[in-house]
Amino acid sequence: MAYQADRSQYPSRRPDGSLDIDLSSGKYLKLWQGPQHPGITGNMSVELTVCGDEVVEGKTHVGYLHRGFEKLMERRTFIQCFPIVCRICVPEPDFNEYCYAAAVEELAGLEVPERADWIRTLILEMGRINSYLMYLGGQAGALGQGVIGQWTTYVRDLMLDRFEELSGARIYHMFIMPGGVRDGLPDGFDQRMEETLREIESTLADVKDVMFQNAVFKKRTVGLGYIDPAIVDQYGVTGPTARAAGVAKDVRRDQPYLVYPELDFEPVVGQDSDVFTRADVRRRDLLMSVDLIRQILARMPRSGAVMAPLPNVLHWKIPFGETYICGECSRGEYGYYLVTDGSGYPRRVNVRGPSYTHAMALLERLIVNCNISDVAALMVSLHTYPPEIER
Amino acid sequence: MSLSDVLSPFSAWKNLFRDPVTIPDPLNDRPGAPRYRGFHQNDVEKCIGCGTCEAICQNAAIDMVAVAEIATKPGDSGLRPRIDYGRCCWCALCVDVCMTSSLSMSNEYKWVDHDPEVFRFTPGVDLKHWDSAELGYRRPEGHRLTGNERVDMGELEPEARADSFVEIVAGYDLEQAKLEADRCVSCGLCVATCPTHMAVPEYIATIRDGAYEQGVRLLYQTNPFSNVCGRVCTHRCETSCAARHEGDPIAIRWLKRHIIDQVPHDRIKQIAAEGRVSEPSGHQVAIIGAGPAGLTAAFDLAKAGHGVTVFEAQPAPGGMMRYGIPEYRLPYDKLDEDIDVIRSMGVEIRCSTRVGEDISIDQLRAQHDSVLLAIGLHQGRSTRIPGSEHRDVVSAVELLRRITLGERFEVPETLAVIGGGNVAMDIARSLARMQRQQHGKVGVTLVALEAEDLMLADREEIDEAREEGVVIIPSRGPRQCVIERDAVIGLETVHCISVFDEQGRFAPNYDDSDIQLHDAGLIVEAIGQAADHAFLGEPLTEALEWERNRIRIDADGRTSEPWLWAAGDAVQGPDVITAVAAGHRIAASMMAIFAGKPAATR
């Protein structure tokens, strides 16, 4: 939305910078987008003040999904935290499992077998693909293109089948445990994975034709939701959202973890920093994950332990310590800050979900002067998952 | 933007000619993956109801419930896990931690019902169609959440121990004990099995926390003989340990010993005296026999303020713990420490005082409110084979007693032991040590009636005896002691085909064609013991009720005489810990009676 030189229709600012909105003037309307609304990502809402069809102020409201995981974990033993962390982010739960496990391993001094590291990397990339597929459907859907969501849901379902045969569950895998992973790959997994990857590639080719080479999509998204590269660090923007602004941040390369140093990849970067570019960066990142999975399956060790010997988990105590473990998830930097105090329970767990910065501070800035019909597309383009905002 | 951007989206229409990807009948065409974590299965025969699954479940979805068809027995609580699928999150930690691998998950995940109550059931008991499902989540091989290997106990090598009576077992150091204690899952099956119900999981927890004084406190709540039981207990607790099903049982006995080894003796005395009643009640109790049963009762009674006098025929207290167990298993100074704590409660022990000779039982009855008969089995049984009346055919208990008393007697270069139990091993190994000291070599032949795998002695005793040079020959019955010119020269044995008949009665079946002669200048009989009741006198013997040569007692240890209780090996075998349990029961029973009646004035 271009800047309007005539400001007479817009609210003036008070000396403290806040907007002087007089709702009784008849010029403004309060409009809630969410928490029950198809144009919102998950359980949150945006309180919009509109002037005509233009947003003059947007306040984000969260708390609809608060389950208090961080507090729950303080009352659970270290092994009992393992099944609940995945619930902090539903569409891509594996980063919670990995970050939690890695933090516990570091503080408890456990040496994870190499094979487990490869399997963990494989799982994280599989999860990334799932997350991006879900995003693409949502991004297109926010602009009325229902068919993209149908296609990506189909191939995501195939990837869920691979998760099911590997981990025993489709959504909450509970497979990456402190100490390693539960088991190795099942027989014939590679072949079925290759078939799934081919199906994903072919579907993405269709998505490119129908969604990205599409006059309507371009018209709606090019130039929408511009993020100035200068504010990327200021707002704590990470992941594809930052890379679409030309800032080549990728934890996989910047702070290598697991077996990423041994894999061949370059962070996918865009230039224009708008909704279209962010969608395109994610599509290319998805294809890179497909390539990474092929690299992993070709090179991973096929025998050996997948779990470090654990002490008796029923009364596992971890000495005093604190650590921060992070990884590059589909939305940006995902991190766990863990403090232990020598007891059998975590003293403090803090989860850094990238949606926290993207969906609140950043969205409130980007939403001003946006057309109401573009709010959904703008919000989806930040790829936010409310459960990780409200741990 | 170009023309292709307008035309390209129409390529979506090609999907009109593709088959749909939807699964037409997902309820039937879509089984769970082979590893799927679906509804639980439980092999209730394998399950021991240890409750580890309940302990690890972070959702509190599992309750251990009593099941009508399953009886409580040693090593099995009789409870089985009931799972609430309104709470279960399918994480399978219960399967991972299961001590017997009885719990697993099927790949069945579809179940629709209008009644929410049906989703709480006991797998394996409430039968479901997936109980026999072959696919589903099983604990992967090698995936363990609790340690399954016991920390090795340091022991003297055979060369180092074979000629001395120095204690063989080294005991755990702090780090080893912590590692071993860490394996315990605190299920408590051991507590139910232990005759005196020691608080095993709790005292093992004090090792993990390094809170040894609290550990001693817990030990003394149920057992004043932790030095003894920490070394020679028959550890039935370990046979019911949940960890034994897929690994080694927790070394409960060694951990008990570790606790008591860590706290100075004076501090142990202080801890044991906590809660002691210093005001005398006036009630007086006489205890005949300073063995584990008598001294345990004495400890409880004296701690509660009652006057206790123990009469012991031998020169030192301890009973069979001193005169039956060789020093290399239980050093005398450790036994003395336990007894010293008991003495410090105010118990008077009169040694070398034989009831019936030095003091009559009627006198005891007159001077005390109640009397406890806690004599052991100090008479050896004889095989009564030809030649067994010879002076060089002796009983094992007598010889063990003489060794403890410090008698220096000559051991011949070859000797034979008859018997396959722990007493036979004790005497064989003791005499082997003396042979090595006197002759520099071992010449002990031990013959047991039972086959090797049926021998009554502990496996470790048999192995260690062999390591020390004892020749153990199973399946041989004694036939005669061969005597030439009034001297024993050997033992003749015959092959024993079977020990029991079809009805399970003792009826050895011999193969008379297979006879062997074992050189022996001394033959030791270790085939069982008996009590000597002669001191009771005829009137009391007549008055008491008997049951197969044992005084009949009720559950509280009371005899048919209201002033007399009986305990120990003479009425109820077979080990120290059973005697300790009986001592506690009897002290409680006496005190219940004292509570209802004032002390007699004497």
Image (cartoon, coloured by chain):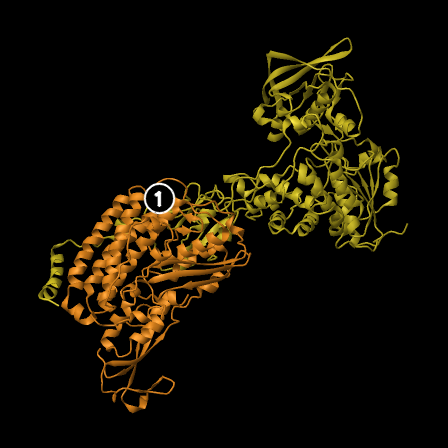
Chain colours: A orange, B yellow
Q: What residue lies at 35% left-to-right and 50% top-to-bottom? A: A261
Could you say where residue A224 lies in the image, as x and y percent from the top left? 23, 72
Which chain does the residue under circle 1 lie in?
B
> Which residue, as the protein is rendered here, is positioned at the far top?
B485
Can residue B112 be seen? no
Could you say where residue B137 lies in the image, as x and y percent from the top left? 38, 46
Q: What residue lies at 36% left-to-right and 49% top-to-bottom? A: A259
B147 left or right of A133 in image:
right
The residue labelled by disc 1 is B135
- Give B346 or A68, whichever is nearer the viewer: A68
Quarter holding residue A334 = bottom left
Quarter holding residue B417 = top right
The N terminus of chain A, quarter of image: bottom left
B390 left or right of B152 in image:
right
Can residue B462 be seen? yes
A190 left or right of B8 in image:
right
Looking at the rendered structure, the kind of residue marked 1 is: Leu
> Which residue, as the protein is rendered here, is positioned at the far bottom?
A25
Quarter holding residue B446 = top right
Could you say where residue B533 lies in the image, as x and y percent from the top left? 79, 32
- Give B549 or B388, whichever is nearer the viewer: B388
Q: What residue lies at 26% left-to-right and 65% top-to-bottom? A: A244
Could you say where residue B12 lies in the image, as x and y percent from the top left? 13, 60
A262 left or right of B243 in image:
left
What crowding class fits label 1: few (fewer than 14 Cα within 10 Å), some (14-19), or many (20 or more)? Answer: many
The C terminus of chain A, quarter of image: bottom left
